[in-house]
Image (spheres, grey):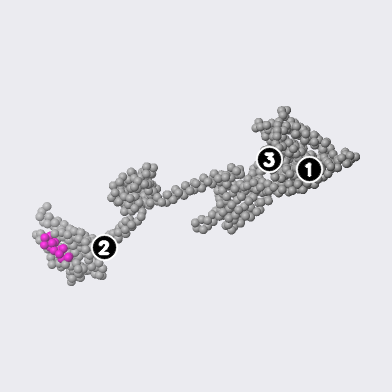
Amino acid sequence: MDKETLRTNLSEAHIYMKELLQSFVETTTDAISIRDMKGNILLINNAFEKIYGWTFHDLVRDPYCLVPENLINETIEIFRPIKSSGKRISGYETVRKRKDGTMVHVSLTASPIRDIEGNIVGTSVIARDITESKKAEVALLESEAKYRILVENTNDIISSFDVNMNKIFISPSIELHLGYTQDEYLQTDLLAMIHPDDVKTIVDVHQSITIHKKTVQIESRVKHKNGSWVYLESRCVPILSENAKLESYLVVSRNITERKQSEEALRKSEEQYRFIAEHTADFISVIDKFGKTVYSSPSHLKKLGTDRIHFDKVHPDDASRVCEQFSHMLRTITPIICEYRYKLDHERWIYLESRGMPYTSADGEYPYFFNVTRDITEEKQKEELFLRTEKLSVVGELAASIAHEIRNPLTTLKGFIQYLQPETSDSSSYTPILLSELDRINFIVSELLVLAKPQNLHIRPVLLHSMIENVVKLLESEANLKNIVITTELVNEPISINCEEYQFKQLLINILKNSLDAISENGEISIQTTLRSDKQVLIRITDNGCGIPPELLPKLGEPFYTTKEKGTGLGLLVSNKIIKDHQGSIRFSSEMNKGTTVDITLPCL
């Protein structure tokens, strides 16, 4: 290649590089300006005018029009080393004034411009608008300040960990809840502070967050500096990079020890009350405001045979009253007390007392009603026994009074008849009859005295079978008149009992007389004795009479209660007292139109 061609090529290359440089200057987004050694503006690009708003002519008139007045001297001093020694400035951040008066944050890079000989002939400045980044930086600083205040003053424990669960940061609140200072806590072993039963949970959560990169909430126990255990409820948040790679963990923990203690106390309290409810003999149930039973204690099944009280088993005479009272409770939200009869599966009636009480919730609502029911059958029986005893006491006092009133004239009559007996020799056959009848009246009066206050009994050993045979002979004539057969099945060996012979014979007479009255004609009465292993003798008297209705059986033995048209009800009352005085028992069983059985049990010798 000749010299001319080389010169031509170099010239073209120079032109091309010049055009390329010019294109770069005009198309870059950074503001570019060139000044001479006196500070006069020589060149600016389009980006300069866009950023600052000043034109080339504005800068020609006032080279420092874009520099705030308070920064002019600083700017001159900063740029002096560039002109004197060729020093380069990079990343100098300052502010410049736009033509509209607003300020713009810029980052300046300044370099010297040299001629061919290397002499400094001017300076070039490249300015980058960093206003938005400055705003973002200020906002970030403000945000960091706010969050730092929040972290330093919140009661929650805020901590961060790297991907290997090494501690990075802990908030000052750690000392409030766990007793450690920030430095002390950061030096501890994390897993050594976790309750042994919760370590696996922490490890599993760490693995889950690592794999799924999702927030997880857990509860764990952490050891306090004093050795106690603190319950923490923690929310573990994964911190991800721009490419979704796990960088660290943020953990926000709340101390829930008091809540856990309250829950534990409540649980124990509930267990205690549930234990009481499930082991008490009372029937406890909870009813909602619609009348539906939502809880029933196990005592229902043990005692009633069903899981709850069913209204269809309430006695028909009590059902309407019970329904009305419970409806009143649900409607008016007032406590009630209700007594009623309830039928068990084996057709036995018991007495129940139910107490209904509304339960008031914290918000003043009445969502439930408690119903506590008690079996008061025994109490009712005691009340009935007390009333019966009171009646017996009144009857006894009345009987004693009547007996004494009758016995006095009887004594007089008997005395005069005995006195007149020698003078009435012609009619002497009537005198024994009169005396016998007077004795019989006296005997009846003595029966009334049995009802009076306790008497001195002349207890002595007596042969049972002899007494039974004597009584049977006494009543045979009356039985024959009605074609009634009295049979006996007595054990072969003799049986002796301690008794007051006169009273015990009266007991047998009373029962046999009842059987004779219950049979119209052509009947049968059987008397059996059985020697039991517990040194007791059973006397069973059975008839095939009309029987006694089941609902009347409990009333037998009450004063003045009788099924006979002309009876007084004193026969069985006297019989019951005689049995009681002899430490025995008497039981009645009967079926209508089939007959009645009376079982008498007495201790034998």
Q: Is residue 403 visible?
A: yes
The answer to which quarter of the image holds residue 88 is bottom left
Give the residue at mark 3: 580
Task: Kindly identify the amino acid type of the residue bearing the numbered disc 1.
Answer: Asn
Which of the two residues, 592 or 115, is positioned nearer the viewer here? Answer: 592
Q: Nearer the viewer, residue 484 or 217?
A: 484
Q: Amino acid at mark 2?
A: Thr
Spatial separation of the CA atoms under disc 3 and disc 1: 24 Å
Q: Which residue in the structure is indicated by mark 1? A: 442
Q: Name the residue: 28% across, 50% down.
A: 183
Q: Secondary structure at mark 2?
A: helix
**Marks 2 and 1, how far apart in space?**
135 Å
Q: Which residues are magenta?
A: 74-86
178 magenta-colored: no
| 512 left or right of 378 in image | right
Q: Dot 3: within a 10 Å radius of its alpha carbon, few (fewer than 14), some, or many (20 or more) residues?
A: few
Q: Residue at x 86, y 41 (%)?
A: 421
**Any magenta on residue 84?**
yes
| Other residues around mark 1 within 10 Å, as few (<14) / some (14–19) / many (≥20) | some
Q: What amino acid is found at the position of numbered circle 3 in the picture?
A: Lys
